[in-house]
Amino acid sequence: MNFALQNLPTSELKIADLTLRAQPVENGTAKFDISMSLREIGDGSVEGSIEYSKDLFEEETIERMAGHFSLLMQGLVSRPDCPISNHALLAKSEEDQLIEYFNRDLNDCWSAPLDVNRNRIAQDHR
């Protein structure tokens, strides 16, 4: 993982009749598994990009991670005095989905008769 925050002015550089300005470059190869680069722009906001290994991550995963980061940043800006551990990484809908998914098997287990579950546990430990 690589993280870079570019907070120096990125205005154009003019030398005589020559004007230089930064241009995005895509080389098609990720230098790190994941690399996030953010830069401050003129109006006080921040823009960024994420470069990642397509062999390790799917685009949907990176988009979800970017959403988590954005939600965290929004929380930090709106409540800067709150400890970072108290800020959300997941949207409420995603949190509800995870809770439902991880409790699915537990609900199935409790809905079966108790003696069936005892037999299953006993067989698993033989």
Image (tube, rainbow, N blue to C red):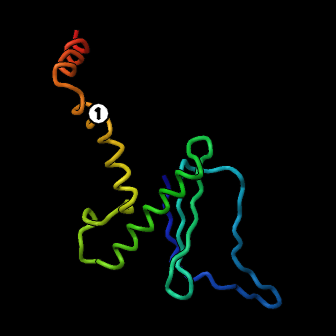
Q: Amino acid at mark 1?
A: Asp
Looking at the picture, how far across and down is residue 32, in whole percent?
A: 56, 49
Tell me: residue 35, above or below residue 15: above
State the image coordinates of residue 98 (x, y, percent, origin top left).
36, 49
Image check: 28 left or right of 65? Answer: right
Tag 1's secondary structure?
A: helix
Residue 61 in the image, given as x and y percentages of width and height: 52, 51
* Residue drawn 22% across the image and 13% down it: 125
Residue appearing at x 43%, y 63% in the figure: 69
Which residue is identified by label 1?
108
Residue 125 or 108: which is nearer the viewer?
A: 108
Residue 41 lies, in percent from the top left, at: 56, 82
Above or below — where is 40 with respect to 57? below
Return the residue nearer the eye: 63 or 23.
63
Q: Quadrant of residue 82?
A: bottom left
Residue in view at x 59 percent, y 56 percent? 51
The residue sitting at 21% across, 19% down in the picture is 116
Q: Nearer the viewer, residue 119 or 19?
A: 119
- In the picture provided, is 83 more to the left or to the right than 52? left
